[in-house]
Image: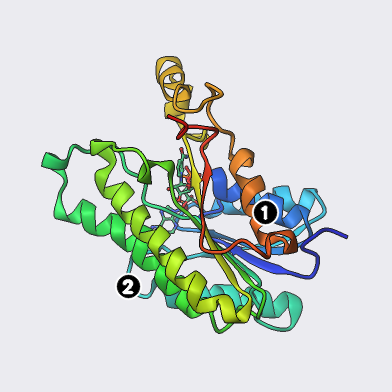
């Protein structure tokens, strides 16, 4: 019996990277996981296959967040998938992980479109995903929002991305108070630089440079972050809510 046996989970953006590792980690503890993606259905299906090979249960749900009708599409797929497999649409664990990641733009060059997109995907979508999920999350449920260590370190070329994630952390804080009477915890996790499989992490000089951010002088692997998210989803983390958890490998030690 895993720590999450009989539970259900949605991990947005779990076709790859930290989201995939989180989906795998939750499923390994026994949760049935909805593997969400925007466009890359094949990658999401690979996540499902990895989970099934491991003896777990999962299904895919597609919806591009930050576009009209996104929440309706996401929940139509989620509720159908849950009902088909469990006979009801109960969601115990919600991980808001999908994000529009900054490519690095100096403030002078940020466009209104870039700004709106960052906030649409990283801030507005998680708010309305939680709002809609509240009808499905039972007392004692879990919400984890994936932020970034960049909300703690001034990095001008990442200003808009960090602003959108800072707002996400505020969302965790206020929803934690709002949902505490129901025993639902809401927390933010702040990863540092994490090798999500993107080709940029294969460039040796860049890898070396980015490794310096962590006190361990290495990049995080997705599982380094996923393990913490899984912990927050378990009963053992019952007494943690409203926090922004530094998972940067000591990147903020100064
Ligand atoms: P990633 O490998 O780039 O994967 C992004 C995931 O989000 C994919 O599943 C993608 O789906 C989905 N996604 C992207 N835009 C979407 C949209 N508009 N609607 C729906 N889904 C969308 O991500 P990652 O690097 O693992 O990052 C995961 C989280 O950690 C993000 O919140 C990120 O801000 C945070 N983070 C990452 C790092 C890092 O160094 N990697 C550091 C700090 C924080 P498709 O595959 O279909 O495109």
Residue lying farthest to the right in this orientation: 1
Q: Residue at x 32, y 43 (%)?
A: 102
Query: In the visual, does 215 lie left or right of 67?
Result: right
Which disc is residue 230 wearing?
1
Please tell me whether residue 105 is drawn above or below residue 232 in the rendered image.
above
Q: Please state, as top left, top right, bottom left or bottom right, where the N terminus lies in the image.
A: bottom right
- Whether residue 250 is visible to the viewer of this picture, yes or no, is yes
- Any mark on residue 216, and which? none
Q: How is the image coloured?
A: rainbow
> Which residue occupies the foreground of this view, 236 or 206?
236
Is residue 206 depicted above or below 34 in this figure? above
Residue 8 x/y as whole percent: 69, 69
Of the image marks 1 and 2, the number of the one nearer the N terminus: 2
Nearest the viewer among 51 and 224 is: 224
Q: CA distance from mark 1 to mark 2?
A: 31 Å
User: Where is 220 relative to 23, above or below?
Assistant: above
* Residue at (57% x, 76% y) in the render: 180
Residue 202: x, y in percent? 48, 23
Disc number for residue 68: 2
- The answer to whether one can see residue 46 in this image is no
Instruction: Please tell me whether mark 1 or mark 2 is closer to you in this view.
Output: 1
Q: Is residue 60 above or below residue 79?
A: above
Q: Categorize mark 2 by other alpha carbons within 10 Å: few (<14), some (14-19), many (20+).
A: few
Q: Quadrant of the C terminus?
A: top left
Q: Residue at x 45, y 17 (%)?
A: 208
């Amino acid at each position: 019996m895993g720590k999450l046996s009989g539970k259900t989970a949605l991990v947005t953006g779990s076709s790859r990277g930290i989201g995939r590792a989180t989906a795998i980690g939750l499923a390994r503890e026994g949760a049935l996981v909805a593997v969400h993606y925007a466009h890359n259905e094949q990658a999401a299906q690979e996540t499902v296959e990895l989970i099934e090979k491991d003896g777990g249960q999962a299904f895919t749900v597609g919806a591009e967040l930050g576009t009209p009708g996104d929440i309706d599409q996401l929940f139509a797929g989620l509720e159908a998938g849950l009902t088909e497999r469990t006979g009801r649409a109960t969601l115990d664990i919600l991980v808001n992980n999908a994000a529009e990641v900054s490519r690095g733009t100096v403030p002078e060059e940020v466009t209104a479109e870039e700004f709106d997109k960052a906030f649409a995907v990283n801030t507005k979508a998680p708010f309305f995903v939680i709002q809609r999920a509240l009808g499905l999350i039972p007392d004692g449920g879990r919400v984890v929002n994936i932020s970034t260590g960049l909300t703690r370190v001034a990095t001008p070329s990442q200003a808009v991305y960090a602003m959108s994630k800072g707002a996400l952390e505020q969302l965790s804080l206020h929803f934690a108070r709002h949902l505490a009477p129901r025993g639902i915890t809401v927390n933010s996790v702040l990863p540092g630089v994490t090798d999500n499989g993107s080709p940029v992490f294969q460039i040796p000089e860049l890898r070396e440079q980015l490794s310096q951010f962590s006190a361990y002088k290495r990049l995080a692997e997705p599982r380094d972050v996923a393990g913490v998210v899984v912990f927050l989803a378990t009963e053992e983390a019952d007494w943690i809510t409203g926090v922004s958890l530094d998972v940067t490998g000591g990147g903020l030690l100064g």
